[in-house]
């Protein structure tokens, strides 16, 4: 990581833009794509000239990492009384002198937001303003539409076909003695892992146990703290973690709470389409992008809690406990190239039990941060479990849920408490967590996401629309000729999925056990 | 259309980088006095038409790789502006008329209705 700092002098219009042009030189040297240089430079220049126009003095700090540019501009200035108003295009408080120079059109802050992937602003009247933004250097890779973190251990598969029926998007096939994931259909939810009794489907996470240093921050999902039975309080688990060397622990709850508040606030803004869908679960966001693209405008533009935590702790030595494949994908995404490490719940649990049996643990004083409970939560409809999520999303599409201000959807039962990576029951652990006073933490921040959620071409049969239409009708015709038993013996979950596989040349029609009984002529796959 | 031809057609005077002007292809024109908007519209093949005449204009040109700027109303720019345009390889031209008329002439040239 490379870090630079430039001072900015208020009122000095001759030097305004100097820091931005240094940034541009640096980005050119490391070979950043011109279009990305352009975005970063526009944002930096706007932030820099804002300091020159409004403040006495300020500072621009630039951090270059392998995957991203982080810029922070702080100033000692008058501060902004109403940030929401300042964010409106055309609103400006610039003095006439600045306007004569071509500034003060009220486009500065919106321009920064438009040209960056992350944008944060904080301001205190009488003290100053802080603007921070991030531009990702590899947007194409970052947007890698079909990444997932589910891995197949194929020796373990005994072809029971449970995963075929469990997968909500029909992304699984069992062929040649093992499960195959059609990545373009996979939404990274843990349904197949849950269904698999033999461990043939699991999370692609490393087996090593990260070694903590004094600076290490461990981020744990609340569910982790509840995995040790009724007698072990969250405080005790935190204390046991401390004996392992994880002195600084933050509970994911903080960012979950922050996101819920941000989504509620967003739903109150005039003109928002209700229900606002909180992007709390990355698997649900994947599902919407693939199956319900018309609902993308409903998603509140914020980072998922795991992403926000990861963003906030960038630069720290952070260790994350990934509760599910979708979280693991987020944490290892190239979009967030940082030095953080990831550990699976089972590995950490194992080490923790070992540490406790060796050294013993007393009830610690570390308490998760607590705050008052919120009446606002009544605005939120919580839906758990992927099938319920899908049926409610269908209702949103039908327009019958527009009385609901905010929806929080989770692929797993009881939200992240229901991941198959936990050992204890979801309903019990969440009940105990809420009873222990959890769920009302306040310390984390929601981070606004400027990169748009994008429809995913999950079902695309062919990049050429005409050919795709032909294939669609071939699938239709073949499906009608198949027995319709959905037996799964061919390795596809349904006869229509099998027909699609045949038309897409993924499998031969002879894989159907009933192929002798297929009505009509054998299908020509060309 | 080459910037030098464009300048000639609208009756503008080329102040810097005559040579570069004869090689520079212009396919777009953006006219305005608001820096935020200029930032978003600027490109290497766009000619910027503006009433601005401070050194900030050249800073923006440098940051956004703007190759051509057209000043208006036949003004005589400050020597600093001309010097920094030379340094940054920006072609500076001055149109004898105001923004509205300059744009009208440019439009006729670029849309082939000259």
Image (spheres, helix red, strand yellow):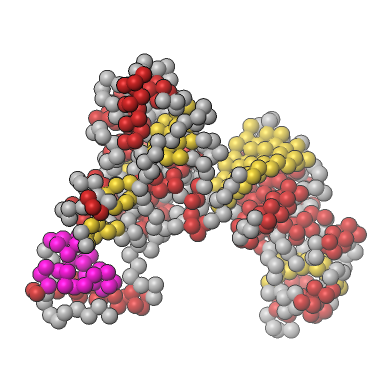
| Res. A145 image quadrant | bottom left
Direction from residue A393 to residue B45 in the image, left or right: right
Residue shown at 23% from the left, 57% from the top: A178
Q: Position of residue A125 (x, y in %)?
A: 66, 32
The part of the chain drawn in magenta is A487-515
On screen, residue B108 versus residue A397, left or right, reads right
Residue A111 spot, x, y in % from top left = 62, 52
Residue A53 in magenta stretch:
no
Tell me the quarter of the image containing the N terminus of chain A.
top right
Residue A118 appears in view: yes
Residue A249, percent from left and from top:
45, 28
Q: In this view, does B94 lie to the left or right of A141?
A: right
Residue A117 position in % (x across, y down): 54, 50
- Looking at the image, residue A149 lies above or below residue A263: below
Tell me which residue sits at (65%, 55%) in the image: A30
Which residue is rendered at x = 34% and y = 77% of the image?
A467
């Amino acid at each position: 990581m490379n870090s630079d700092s430039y001072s900015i002098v208020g009122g000095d219009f001759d030097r305004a833009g100097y820091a931005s042009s240094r940034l541009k030189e640096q980005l050119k040297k490391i070979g950043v794509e011109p279009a990305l240089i352009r975005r970063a430079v526009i944002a930096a220049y706007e932030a820099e000239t804002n300091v020159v126009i409004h403040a006495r003095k300020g500072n621009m700090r630039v951090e270059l990492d392998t995957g991203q540019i982080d810029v922070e501009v702080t100033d000692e200035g008058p501060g902004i009384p109403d940030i929401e108003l300042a964010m409106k295009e055309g609103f400006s408080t610039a003095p006439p002198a600045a306007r004569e120079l071509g500034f003060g059109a009220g486009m500065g802050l919106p321009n920064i937001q438009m040209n960056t992937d992350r944008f944060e602003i904080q301001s205190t009247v009488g003290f100053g303003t802080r603007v921070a933004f991030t531009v990702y250097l590899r947007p194409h890779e970052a947007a890698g539409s079909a990444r997932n973190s589910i891995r197949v251990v194929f020796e373990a598969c005994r072809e029971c076909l449970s995963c075929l029926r469990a997968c909500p998007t029909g992304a699984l096939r069992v062929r040649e003695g093992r499960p195959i994931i059609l990545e373009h259909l996979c939404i990274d939810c843990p349904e197949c892992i849950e269904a698999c009794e033999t461990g043939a489907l699991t999370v692609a996470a490393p087996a090593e146990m990260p070694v903590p240093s004094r600076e290490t921050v461990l981020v744990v999902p609340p569910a982790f703290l509840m995995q040790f039975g009724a007698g072990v309080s969250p405080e005790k688990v935190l204390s046991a973690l401390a004996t392992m060397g994880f002195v600084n622990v933050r509970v994911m709850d903080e960012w979950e709470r922050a996101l819920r508040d941000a989504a509620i606030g967003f739903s109150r803004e005039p003109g928002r389409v209700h229900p606002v869908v909180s992007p709390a679960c990355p698997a649900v966001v994947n599902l919407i992008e693939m199956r319900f693209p018309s609902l993308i405008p409903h998603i509140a533009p914020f980072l998922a809690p795991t992403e926000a935590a990861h963003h906030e702790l960038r630069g720290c030595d952070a260790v994350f406990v990934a509760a599910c494949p979708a979280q693991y994908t987020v944490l290892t995404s190239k979009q967030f190239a940082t030095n953080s490490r990831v550990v699976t719940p089972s590995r950490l649990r194992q080490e923790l039990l070992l540490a406790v049996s060796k050294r013993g643990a007393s009830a610690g004083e570390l308490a998760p941060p607590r705050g008052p409970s919120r009446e606002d939560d009544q605005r939120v409809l919580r839906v758990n479990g992927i099938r319920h999520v899908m049926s409610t999303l269908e209702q949103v599409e039908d327009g019958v849920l527009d009385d609901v201000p905010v929806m929080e959807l989770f692929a797993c039962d009881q939200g992240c408490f229901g991941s198959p990576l936990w050992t204890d029951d979801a309903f019990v652990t969440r009940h105990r967590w809420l009873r222990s006073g959890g769920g009302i933490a306040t310390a984390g921040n929601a981070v606004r996401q400027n990169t748009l959620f994008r429809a995913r071409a999950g079902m695309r049969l062919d990049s050429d629309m005409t050919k795709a239409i032909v294939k669609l009708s071939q699938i239709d015709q073949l499906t009608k000729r198949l027995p319709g038993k959905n037996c799964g013996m061919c390795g596809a979950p349904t006869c229509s999925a099998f027909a699609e596989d045949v038309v897409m040349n993924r499998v031969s029609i002879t894989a159907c056990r009933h192929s002798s009984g297929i009505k009509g002529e054998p299908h020509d796959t060309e | 259309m080459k910037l030098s031809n464009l300048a000639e057609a609208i009756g503008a005077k080329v102040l810097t980088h005559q040579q570069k002007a004869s090689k520079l292809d212009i396919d777009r024109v953006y006219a305005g006095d608001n820096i935020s908007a200029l930032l978003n519209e600027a490109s290497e093949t766009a000619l910027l038409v503006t009433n601005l005449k401070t050194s900030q204009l050249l800073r923006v040109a440098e940051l956004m790789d703007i190759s051509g700027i057209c000043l208006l109303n036949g003004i005589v720019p400050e020597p600093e502006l001309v010097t920094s345009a030379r340094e940054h390889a920006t072609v500076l031209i001055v149109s004898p008329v105001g923004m509205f008329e300059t744009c009208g002439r440019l439009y006729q040239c670029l849309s082939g209705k000259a």
